[in-house]
Image (cartoon, coloured by chain):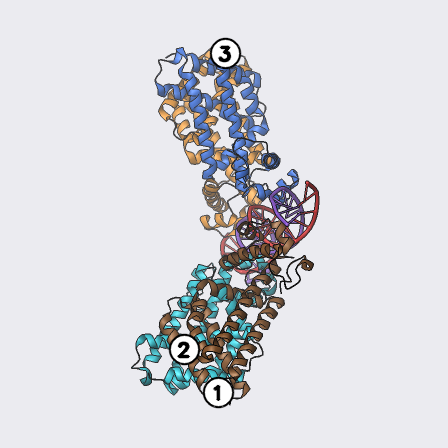
Chain colours: A brown, B cyan, C orange, D blue, E purple, F red
DNA sequence: TATGAATGAGGTTTCATTCAT
DNA sequence: TATGAATGAAACCTCATTCAT
């Protein structure tokens, strides 16, 4: 994590709030805005420089090259993903996993249905098909998230008797639904969100409660 | 359709196999390969020229600019989408829509789970967030496909009593699942396809048969 | 003259109305239109092909290269110049050179003040600074025209006593005035033509009549 | 003025000798040489790069595009024109406008009769027929110069009684003569300058002194 | 740490010209 | 005589990256 800084020796992987880190965030934030609007390839370092208020030359002080900035953005995104997963885990302790998940359907949809969010996610996936590094980051983060959730699902009495494969497949399908929303948002912008939420909740509930 | 050729007057909109058309296909095929491997922006005309065996200059005889080639690829893709929709419609006449759809789950998954297919689809969606033209193409084709299928669904006795909004939302969710597979394939390449197919079939069946 | 055709052996320099000649004119006419609107360098053979209705390949049957087309246009222009000179000569036989020339002031101004005419003339001169061939054509035609007119002027009783150099200089200045109009038209499009004509007539008359 | 630099905020419109300005001049000087020899369209950025000793990429740091370089050259030229006009104005205060102008005939002719000067002026005019921007620059500068001189002429006792239109027309014709010299130089390189100067002086004197 | 001038490779696109038919 | 598909060089321009300060 945060390996993208050049003076790596000054950032001992744990400290996250040194001066360099702040400046890094400044760049990443600007880059995020640009990538969102124009995609990775159509975003020039010059533009990132202007938006971030940091000179092009100095950006290279923090990031080896443009790819490293992309990696930084991807990492940010995946960190958020894992944070949401962790949130789900914590909430399921208090209200139970089914209700915790049901409660997350709505914000989850809102998140993917935000066109900007969806765009950047798609952009990252497109990059993953080209950059081995990005692909690995994405797949590893996804695996971690899945493993965490699977752990939770295994504790559900209703699903306890299901074979592990079936459980994993159900999780995969649940994730598929949320993933699909990012695409649907772009293909069908006029989608009726309220009705869609109801249907998705029904699907999720079935997948979480059907014991056979 | 197929308006992307410059000498548009030579392609009478119906015949698709004239000489110009063949050369166009030659370019589109090569472009498809390149776009798949490197994405739209990282694919140079030079490379398309080499792969297609057509000089860079001559490519511009058939396509006004690079964007037109992208549009050609997108159109190809969307045409296939509509063909698959039409196929579903025809099959549902003989075996009923539920069974027709269930029969399409497996090939549908196989299609999206093909990494190459998924990659190009994601690439197209990424482009749609930047190019108004591509976005329009994608959304219009999607709307047509949705309208066609909705027509079918309305004939289902089990769903006839459902409000139109609910029906549309169910369709949206079904499509979401298939869309999501393109992403899941990239995030979770080790996915157990057989189990996933079973779960998806169950979801689809519920959405097609539950009357309330 | 008309040396620009490739099958030069078919056009024995005198015959001007063979089939090839007609086709040549077809190209030159189209080229003239294009050069006028966009200049020599911004006019592509492709465009000339479209405007003339002759295929690009076939244009090269009549003209060795683009430069030859330019030369053809220039020659056309210079031929017109010499024709106007000849006209002046003929008219001066009947009405006298002073009146003949005075009568030509108005149409002469109208000619140069036509923005299109002026544009192409300027274009030709610009080309003359780059192409030795064009420069030679322009200078030679100009010399012929000057010599012809000088012959006339020498017959004027009022000017007969002037040294030859003075006479030539007066002619040069008269030509300068008309040349300048092509530029003035472009720099000062709102110029009052009627008043300008009066002033120019006065200048010309002075140059033609002042005996000292 | 001098707005052609991209970092326009660094050139406070009055100071003309900052570092950026020097580099700009370096490019403009090289471009001027090239334009003179080969014209605008036949001069590549690459060549300007070589002549100016600045990399092609960096040229675009100072000029948005090639047209902006052309505009820079044109502006330089027009600035010189206005400077010469101003000079005339100042000299006419001391020696009177007629003598001031007569004194300028000789250097004025020498200027236009310099083949290089004439060539670039013609080139600019040719460009003006194609580029609205250049046409506007040329016409506006010409209008300013004319207005300035007209102001002077109105103070001449001999001309005071002339109608304004007549006065303007005389000015137009005087300018026409000088303009024409640029063309004459190209068409008639062997022109006898001394004799021509005498004749032109006589014309100018008549236009400045004849009261009717 | 910070700047931004500078580079040069490489991108898209156009165009004069050729050649098989 | 006539076509127009085809080529490939070269044009303009952008951009990631480096380096002197």
Q: Residue at x 51, y 77 (%)?
A: B111
Q: Are marks 1 and 2 on the same chain?
A: yes
**Residue C136: image location, x then y, percent:** 58, 32
1 or 3: mark nearer the eye: 1
**Residue B43: image location, x then y, percent:** 58, 61
- Gap in angstroms between the C-alphas marked 1 and 2: 20 Å
Give above or below for C70 relative to F5: above
2 or 3: mark nearer the eye: 2
- Residue C201 quadrant: top left
Q: Name, please, the residue furthest toward the front.
A: A94
* Residue A201 - label: 2
* C12 on left or right of C196: right
Nearer to us in this view, D37 or B173: B173
- Residue D161 quadrant: top left
Identify the element where label 2 is drawn. Answer: helix
Any part of residue B61 in sight: no
Identify the element where label 1 is drawn. Answer: helix
**Residue B128: image location, x then y, percent:** 47, 63
C-beta proximity under 8 Å, tags 2 and 3: no
Identify the element where label 3 is drawn. Answer: helix
Q: Which chain is home to disc 1?
A: A
Any part of residue C174 in sight: yes
1 or 2: mark nearer the eye: 1
Question: If you read the primary sequence from the N terminus, does the residue marked by circle 1 or circle 2 appear first?
Answer: 1
C-beta proximity under 8 Å, tags 1 and 2: no
Q: Which residue is mark 1?
A: A157
Q: Which residue is mark 3?
A: D94
Q: Are marks 1 and 3 on the same chain?
A: no
């Amino acid at each position: 994590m945060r390996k993208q800084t050049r003076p790596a020796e000054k950032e001992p992987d744990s400290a996250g709030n040194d001066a360099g880190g702040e400046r890094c965030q400044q760049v990443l934030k600007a880059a995020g805005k640009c990538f969102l609007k124009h995609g990775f390839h159509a975003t020039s370092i010059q533009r990132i420089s202007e938006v971030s208020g940091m000179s092009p030359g100095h950006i290279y002080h923090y990031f080896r090259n443009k790819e490293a900035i992309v990696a930084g953005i991807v990492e940010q995104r995946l960190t958020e993903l894992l944070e949401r997963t962790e949130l789900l885990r914590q909430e399921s302790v208090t209200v139970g996993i089914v209700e915790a998940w049901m409660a997350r359907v709505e914000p989850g949809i809102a998140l993917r249905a935000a066109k900007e969010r969806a765009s950047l996610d798609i952009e990252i996936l497109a990059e993953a098909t080209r950059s081995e590094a990005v692909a690995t980051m994405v797949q590893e983060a996804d695996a971690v998230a899945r493993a965490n959730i699977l752990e939770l699902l295994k504790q559900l009495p209703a699903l306890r008797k299901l074979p592990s494969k079936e459980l994993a497949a159900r999780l995969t399908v649940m994730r598929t639904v949320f993933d699909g929303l990012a695409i649907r948002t772009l293909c069908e912008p006029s989608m009726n969100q309220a009705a869609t939420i109801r249907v998705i909740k029904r699907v999720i509930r079935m997948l979480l409660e059907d014991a056979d």
